[in-house]
Every structure is written in C-alpha cells, then in structure tokens.
Image (spheres, coloured by chain):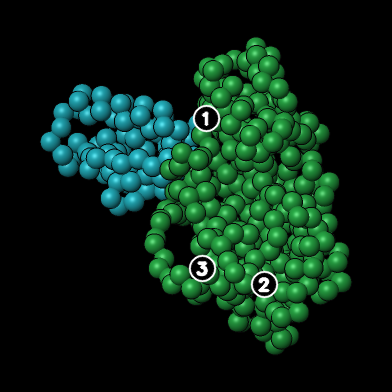
Amino acid sequence: MQLKRNIATSEDGFLFNPSTGDSYAANPMATVILRMLKEGRPLAAIRQKVLEEYEVEGDRLDRDLADFERQLKEAGLLQA
Amino acid sequence: MQKEQGMEDLTIAVTGLNAIDSPGPGMAVIRSLREGLPGRIRIIGLSYESLEPGAYLHDWVDKTYQVPYPAAGTKVLLDRIAHIHDRERLQLIIPNFDAELPNFIRIAPSLEVMGIATFLPTKEQFDAREKERLRAFGEEHGLDVPDERAIHRVEGLSECAGAFGYPMVVKGRYYEAIIAHTGEQAAKAFYQLSAKWGLPVIVQRFIRGTEINIALLGDGEGNAVSIIPMRKLYITDKGKAWAGVTLEDDALTELATRFVASTRWKGGCELEIMRSDDGRLHIMEVNPRFPAWIYLSAAAGQNQPALLARMALGEKVTPCTGYQAGKMFIRYAWDHVTDVGEFQRLSGLGEL
C-alpha cells in the first residue's frame, strides 16, 4: 500500500489530492498510519508498530487496515 | 521590464470593473497588475455603467471613464479612447469582456499607432471558439467538445432531445447556461435565453462530472506562458465559482498546452472543462479573456495579468514552471460606502 507521491498530508490528518482538488479528514489512528505510509514504511512494519504501541488484536487490526486500504483506493489516493 | 528603463510609471486601462455576483475580471486583473509589476502603476478604469463597483474603489482604480457600449461600434470607441489617451497617456489596455473584444481587436492597430499596446487574440481565434462553432473548433484541433446544436426555433429542441436525451444544457449565445430536465424546462430556457442574448441558442449534451477551469496565457506563437487549473469548490446559482482551489494534474496541463499549440492562442484565456466520471476531459467553453478568479494565478505563483502586460510592452517572457497546488480562494461580498456625489459625477460627466 503506497500513497501517490503528490498527495499532501498534514499533521492534523487532512489529505489533499492536487489532481482532483478533493480533501479528506482522517481520524487520529488513520493519521498515524498515514504518517508512516508517507515515510515509505511497508504495511507489515506499520502493522507491527501499531500492535506494539496500541491495544488492538491482530485480527481486528488486519480488518481495519484492509478497510482503510480499500477507502484510500476508492478515493484514488494509492499508487496503481 | 526594468525600473531603470523608465517603465515604472505605467498607465494601464482595464475594463470589467463589475465586481458583482457574476463578476467581471477587471478587479482581479488590477490586483494582479499592482502586485506583479514594479514601480508606480496608474490604473484607468473603463466602465460601461455607473454602478460598476471598481469605479468607486479608488485604492485600486485611480480614475474611471465611461466608454460606449459595444453595439455603438468601433468609431465611437476609438474616439472615446483617443480622448482618454490625450489626458492619461495610456500605455496598455486590457479589455476583459467577451462582448467588447471584437471591437478592441478591430481597433488594436489604430491603438498601436497611438502608442497604446494590447495583447489580444486574433479575430480568427476569437470567432473560431464561439459557442456555436465550438464543436467544429474541437474537431479541428483534436479536442473533446460535447455534441451541440445551434437552434433558431424552439421546435429545434425536440431534435436535440432525441439526439442527447435529458438533461441537456441550453446556452445563451454569449452568456448563461440552463440545465433542462424536461421539454417544458428546455422551451422556457430557450425563450428566456433568446430574449436576453439573441439567436441562435446553443443546446449541448449534458456531461456529468467535476467542473474544472484552466486559466492560461498564450504568447501567440504556440507557447503557453502560464497554465493554472482550478477546481470550483462552491458554485453560485449563476454557475460562477465562489471558491476554488488550484490543481496540479498532468492531463490538464497537457490539454491546455495542446490547445495553445494548435490554436497559437494570443493573450489570456479560460478553458471550462468537465472531467467526466470516466476521467475524460471535455472542453465546455473557451472564454477569450482572463477569468474573474485570475488573481489566484498570481497567488499560486504565476501572475498571468502581469506577464501579459510585460509581453504587451515588448518583453520576451519565458514560460513559467511550477506553482502552488492547493492554493484556494474564497470570494466575499463587501458593502463599499461612498457619497452619492461620486455616482452623480460618473453618471453625469462620464468620469470619476
């Protein structure tokens, strides 16, 4: 899962797609994941980091990550 | 343009001072010129009506003269400009209305003789992108323009409905467009628009999608000096952008570059684009002058009116590269308070 290079993200969790002009707001957990995605971390490393730092079960996290990836994909924010 | 060359005291005449709910581009052009050109700039407003707000905004417009309506023809326009020029020593005129452009294009050689520069499209360029010819224009230049018909009688609507289905877009010859969902609405739009703007009325296939506008500046030799795309974020009931944000998208830049290269467009221009759900870019209109939101080009890093002024005054300008995507404008309404004497002076004496 890789964000398109031109997607702008802010510390507050806002995303801006300069190709379409669409803006999005991410919740605090999604903001943390977005930050790591922008840093270029692979999904497995992000998953591991979240498991270490937050109280969440692996199955639940996998479902949420898959759902988040689907939302980013639908919004056209991921690299093809 | 260098200060030491003595060009700092520029006197520039600008039309389109109607900063109203369907605004002319004049005030945005003036703001860009004042910000983007060095030295002291004297702005001469040219107004058609006494209640064009820009005439009263003296921080922006130093002096305003009324000019005759376009229907009065080129001779009276030239006479009026000669009178203004005698008093103001104009160096450049930037007209901003579609309807006045044919006259200004026609008198441009005479203005040049008088020492007044312009930077306008040719008559052929202006005519070719008119609404009723836009489809053919698109075909000639390999640009995607929705199917359209120019009709002179209300009966023509049924043939359009057969070809396009509903909704379809009914457009006035010069301005305004109405989306008609039924035959009744289309007929009402036909009568309304033909009464206001004359015939023909243009009927266009409706394209569902996202509205994007591109402000561009062509050098007349096939090069786009500047291209700034903007997505409308808030659209008024008159279809005008009340808020918008700059975009960065290679497909939009490529389309505008191709437009300028194939038409060799000279001057400011606005492409009205619809990006349909399948990602295709359709050209809905080509406006032959800067849009009212043109200050956003300056705010994003490419000051198109200032660049136009430089080129008009003989400077060789290199095409711009890079601007800020995500730069946003939000228009607002503000009550400017003045004395009725100002209104009387402009109405009675033709200048303020």
| Residue B16 at x, y percent in the picture | 61, 58
Q: Is residue B253 left or right of residue A30?
A: right
Residue count near mark 3 (Cα–Cα under 10 Å), binned few <14, some 14–19, many ≥20: some
Q: In the rendered structure, are the residues bearing label 3 and label 1 in contact, judged by CB atoms less than 8 Å apart?
A: no
| Residue linked to disc 1 | B209
Q: Name the residue beneath numbered marker 3.
A: B343
Residue located beneath label 2 in the image = B12
Considering the numbered disc 1 on the image, is that residue within a helix, a strand or a loop? Answer: strand
Dot 2 or dot 1, earlier in sequence:
2
Q: Position of residue A24 (x, y in %)?
A: 35, 40
Which residue shows up at 22% across the image and 29% down it? A61
Chain coloured green: B
Any part of residue B19 in sight = yes
Q: Amino acid at mark 2?
A: Ile
Q: Are callouts 3 and 1 both on one chain?
A: yes
User: Which of label 2 and label 1 is nearer to you?
Assistant: 2
- Marks 2 and 1, how far apart at CA: 39 Å
